[in-house]
Amino acid sequence: MNSQNLSIVSLILQAGLVVQLVMAGLVLASLASWTVIFGKLFGLRKVRAANEEFEREFWAGKNLNDLYNDATQRTGGAPMERIFATGMREFLKLRERRVNDVGALLDGARRAMRASFQREMDTIESNLSFLASVGSVSPYVGLFGTVWGIMHAFVGLSNMTQVTLATVAPGIAEALVATAIGLFAAIPAVIAYNRFARDIDRIAIQLETFIEEFSNILQRNAGVPPAPPPANTR
């Protein structure tokens, strides 16, 4: 291979089978990570917007029972709304069972909201570990391809009587492409992981704050007897 053919495409085509397999795996990992990045980018933006919308509605002074009825009838709502509905459902269920102890009411509602919070966070954090794996493993996979390619190149050069830079450069260049592709796959994944981890931490803090604030509201309402059913009129 002469110096005029040292393009990226020609280097990939001239590389050994093992190095080509490494490159193909890294390219697939990069494509998958970009799919996750765009999906998570739009998904977290949607979650933040939905939480903010429900929070505005919650603090607008709307009746809790009306909010609960809306939350149970709506599909695909905000995580904050589902946490609210879970806590409110447990609170009303305990009230229907004539549980009058304020601590038991709050403890049951809080446990229900915590379980719902964990489910929501598991959904929000989905595929985040994949980005961490791509970011941490890809450079080493690329380095493996490089080491293998250089080793293969030097084995081939051992049969030559005269070794010059022109004969060594193509094999080394082919091998170094694997490292470059590994870094190309790892760098965006690491940057996206750090960005999404910060965004998810903010969402978690927002949800935990809402749980505490809603628990305080339930505590104030725990001593209030439930409203009697409407009288039948003829």
Image (spheres, rainbow, N blue to C red):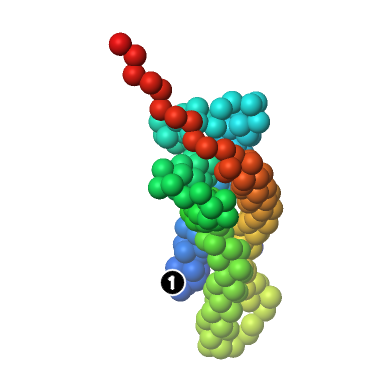
Rendered image quadrant of residue 48: top right
Q: Please tell me which residue is depicted at 47% across the width and 62% down the height of the picture.
A: 24
Give the percent coordinates (x, y) of residue 67: 52, 30
Q: Please tell me which residue is depicted at 56% across the width and 76% down the height of the picture.
A: 144
Rendered image quadrant of residue 223: top right
Which of the pair 97/7 is nearer the observer?
97
* Residue 228 in the image: above or below residue 119: above
Using the rendered image of the protein, determine whether residue 106 is visible from the camera's viewpoint. Answer: no
Using the rendered image of the protein, determine whether residue 15 is visible from the camera's viewpoint. Answer: yes
* Residue 229 in the image: above or below residue 31: above
Give the percent coordinates (x, y) of residue 11: 55, 63
Please identify the residue farthest to the left as the structure is shown. 234
Q: Please tell me which residue is depicted at 52% across the width and 37% down the height of the picture.
A: 225
Which of the pair 130/111 is nearer the observer?
111
Q: Which kind of residue does numbered mark 1 sit on?
A: Leu
Give the percent coordinates (x, y) of residue 70: 46, 29
| Number of dots carrying numbers | 1
* Residue 176 in the image: above or below residue 31: below
Dot 1: few (<14), some (14–19), or many (≥20) neighbours within 10 Å? few
Rendered image quadrant of residue 96: top left
Give the percent coordinates (x, y) of residue 55: 63, 34
Q: Which element type, helix, strand or loop, lies under badge 1?
A: helix
Q: Please tell me which residue is depicted at 65% across the width and 49% down the height of the picture.
A: 212
Which of the pair 34/192 is nearer the observer?
192
Image quadrant occupied by the N terminus: bottom right
Q: Which residue is mark 1?
A: 17
Image quadrant occupied by the C terminus: top left
* Residue 49 in the image: above or below residue 203: above
Which of the pair 60/167 is nearer the observer?
60
